[in-house]
Image: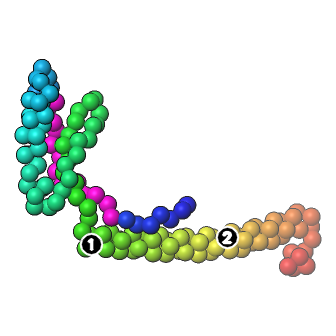
Amino acid sequence: MSKKPLTKKFIELDKKRIPLRQLLHGKEIREAAKALEDFRIKLNEQEFLYGAKITIKWENYGEAYAVARRLETDKEFEDRIEKVRLAAEAKAERERLRKLKEAKLREQEELNKKARVAEYIQKLAREAGIAVSIVE
């Protein structure tokens, strides 16, 4: 698995469904463009206060959404990187503990196997009429 460098992600601030039929159907292009521009005003606050870019996103069943997105701040980016680092450390620790547990389990299985073999040998010795003390 290749590690790609972490970069800043876009954060979705707001999302509004665009009523395309209402805005576009049966209108001239200039009127339709003006209607879309007027609809953009619904996301005005995010655009001016947070520096968001407004894009159109197509989703299932042909629905369109106006989405206001902005880049992560430096603080949000550092927090996300820290979470990724902590998650990687926790994963490595879980892997280490799992390997220790597997090693103990294998060791215990080996001891159990030796004990079962010894019991079986003693059983065979008893059935054959050999003194068990000789076998031990």
Q: Position of residue 3 (x, y in %)?
A: 50, 65
Q: Position of residue 47 (x, y in %)?
A: 13, 55
In the image, is residue 90 part of the stretch drawn in magenta?
A: no
Q: Quadrant of the N terminus?
A: bottom right
Q: Position of residue 33 (x, y in %)?
A: 13, 34
**Main secondary structure type of the part rendered in magenta:** strand
> Image quadrant of residue 70?
bottom left
Residue at the location (53% across, 74% down)?
Answer: 97
Q: On the image, numbered disc 2 is attached to which residue?
A: 106
> Badge 1, how many Cα within 10 Å: few under 14, some, many 20+?
few
Which of the two residues, 56 or 135, is positioned nearer the viewer here? Answer: 56
Residue at the location (77% across, 71% down)?
Answer: 114
Of mark 2 and mark 1, the one earlier in the sequence is: 1
The residue segment tinted magenta is 8-20
Above or below residue 116? Residue 15 is above
- Mark 1 lies on a secondary structure that is helix
Which of the two residues, 112 or 127, is positioned nearer the viewer here? Answer: 112
Above or below residue 24? Residue 110 is below
Number of the front mark, 2 or 1? 1
Amino acid bearing label 2: Arg
Residue at the location (28% across, 58% down)?
Answer: 10
Coloring scheme of the render? rainbow
Which of the two residues, 136 or 44, is positioned nearer the viewer here? Answer: 44
Can residue 126 be spotted in the picture?
no
Q: Quadrant of the C terminus?
A: bottom right
Q: On the image, numbered disc 1 is attached to which residue?
A: 74
Q: Position of residue 48 (x, y in %)?
A: 10, 58
| Gap between marks 2 and 1 measured at Cα | 48 Å
Amino acid bearing label 1: Asp
In the image, is residue 11 part of the stretch drawn in magenta?
A: yes
Can residue 111 be spotted in the picture?
yes
